[in-house]
Image (cartoon, rainbow, N blue to C red):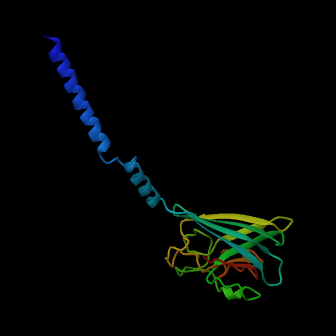
Amino acid sequence: MKKLPLVALAAAFALVSSCKNNNQENAEPDTPNADMITEDNMMQEATPAVKKITTMLSAKSGSDVTGEVVFIEENGEVVMTTNITGLTPGMHAIHLHETADCSADDGTSSGGHWNPTGQKHGKWGDEAGYHKGDIGNLEADEQGNASLTFRTNEWCIGCGDPAKDIIGKAVIVHQGVDDFKTQPTGDAGARVSCAGVIE
């Protein structure tokens, strides 16, 4: 007599479990990791893209100065890396000029120093003022090779801010040294190499 209710109870439990499983099988499947996908997409949108421009220096003013300039923007900072050959040993000024036009044989088609904030010429970071194009000097070895890495958060690549955007500017390497005093160019001499910064 006691076995019958136990058997009935077991059968009822099995029936309920079977219905529950059937309901789960017939239900719409959940999208796997839906929350994770959404978070990943948001992370990708929040992470700024790395921007990169590579431009080649061409010889000017009868020189043999050539090379490569690479600009990389990441996390609100632009890093400029240069590798230059054909210089005379010693120090040479390097600046950003206002126009990405290297068509003139002497490089003068690139205009003056890039100076969107109307400051006087000076050493980068000087409280008395400096141009946004006043990078400074680099040193060539006995073989005429020079390299420089310059980084700043005062530039951007294609952001559209006229006081920061380096697109449309030119890189100019000079024959002489920037003295950081003489206005408006630092008495750096002839323009011996030029590269346009074009996106």
Nearer-the-camera pick, 198 or 4: 4
- Give the side of residue 109 with respect to residue 160, left or right: right
User: What residue is at 55 percent from the left and 79 percent from the top?
Assistant: 119
Quarter assignment of residue 124: bottom right
Nearer-the-camera pick, 49 or 22: 22
Q: How many marks?
A: 0
Which quadrant is the N terminus positioned in? top left
The residue at the far left in this view is 1
Quarter assignment of residue 77: bottom right
The residue at the far top in this view is 1
Nearer-the-camera pick, 10 or 149: 10
- Give the side of residue 38 with respect to residue 190, left or right: left
Does residue 62 lie above or below 148 as drawn? below
Question: Where in the figure is residue 15, as x and y percent of width and height?
Answer: 23, 30
User: What residue is at 71 percent from the left and 67 percent from the top?
Assistant: 82
Which quadrant is the C terminus positioned in? bottom right
User: What residue is at 32 percent from the left and 41 percent from the top?
Assistant: 25
Question: Where in the figure is residue 194, as x and y percent of width and height?
Answer: 72, 79
The residue at the far right in this view is 143
Does residue 141 lie above or below 97 as drawn? above
Quarter assignment of residue 38: bottom left
Nearer-the-camera pick, 36 or 80: 36
Question: Where in the figure is residue 61, as x and y percent of width and height?
Answer: 80, 84
User: What residue is at 50 percent from the left and 73 percent from the top?
Assistant: 159
